[in-house]
Amino acid sequence: MNTLPTFDGDTPLVPANQLLKRGERLLEPDVYRIQLEGRPAVVKDYRRYQGTPLSPIARLLVRHEAKVLRRLQGWKHAPALLGTLGGLALGMEYIPGDTLTASVQGVSQEVFDQLQGALARLHAAGITHNDLHGTNVMVSAGVPVLLDFTSALRWPRWLRNSPITRQLRRSDMKNLVKMRQRLTGQRPSAEQAALLAEPGWVLGLRRTWKRLYRWIKRQG
Ligand SMILES: Nc1ncnc2c1ncn2[C@@H]1O[C@H](COP(=O)(O)OP(=O)(O)O)[C@@H](O)[C@H]1O
Ligand SMILES: [Mg+2]
């Protein structure tokens, strides 16, 4: 097996012009590529929050994403974790390729079949991704790789069949079906559509929230 390069306090972080995404919104990291022991690596860097009141939350996000990636270590559908640095930066394997959104040559059904299998495996491991969309999936030599586990949650065994966990799994799958339809034109099968239909309590909750939201807006 390949040994992974070390990402730690001695790693010089020089983003140079390898910026992949600038963190603009609240608690978004700068994401950039570096060379680490001769190999490309990706850093999610929250250091602009150093010394600010939001620093503990940024640290929590780093620690959380690192924990999920550590669980998935060795899985080909997630980048390998290289480590964290000073609590505010996370280093991981660089995945060459394009995001689903940026795949100009189109994405094959086969990639989506693999992605669906990967998502099923993730769910079977008790993890929901919770932010599945086109920029959080890379396609690397025909293999889909899930990125951005900031919002992912790992559920204890006794909660895995609770309505909320089932809803989050359904929501992941719904996002996948939506991407599939947008990028390949394939519509969900009747069976899939039935499986993805929202249960009554979710529809109720959504309706109540909409009403409340409209009411709040009217007050303003
Ligand atoms: N391991 C990686 N390999 C290659 N590109 C990556 C990697 N991680 C992130 N990226 C690129 O950086 C972008 C932002 O990373 P992401 O983890 O989604 O951060 P954010 O939480 O700000 O959305 C991704 O959409 C992707 O284009
Ligand atoms: Mg993202």
Image (cartoon, rainbow, N blue to C red):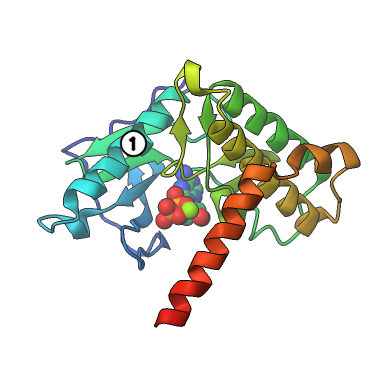
Q: Mark 1 = which residue?
A: 64
Residue occupying the point 41% across, 44% down: 150
Could you say whether the residue bearing mark 1 is in a helix, strand or loop?
Answer: helix
Q: Quadrant of the C terminus?
A: bottom left
> Residue 20 placed where, x, y %?
44, 59
Looking at the image, which residue is at 39% across and 38% down?
92
Camera-side residue of 151 and 208: 208
**From the Cβ of disc 1, is ligand 1 less than 8 Å away?**
no
202 to 210, vertically: above or below: above
Q: Position of residue 169 (x, y in %)?
A: 61, 35
Q: Determine whether, in the image, residue 126 is placed left or right of residue 187.
A: left
The answer, for residue 140, to whether it is visible in the render is: no
Q: Amino acid at mark 1?
A: His
At x 13%, y 59%, the residue is 52
Identify which residue is drawn at 53% across, 48% down. Answer: 131
Viewer-side residue, 149 vs 197:
197
Seen from the viewer's position, the closer of residues 92 and 14 is 92
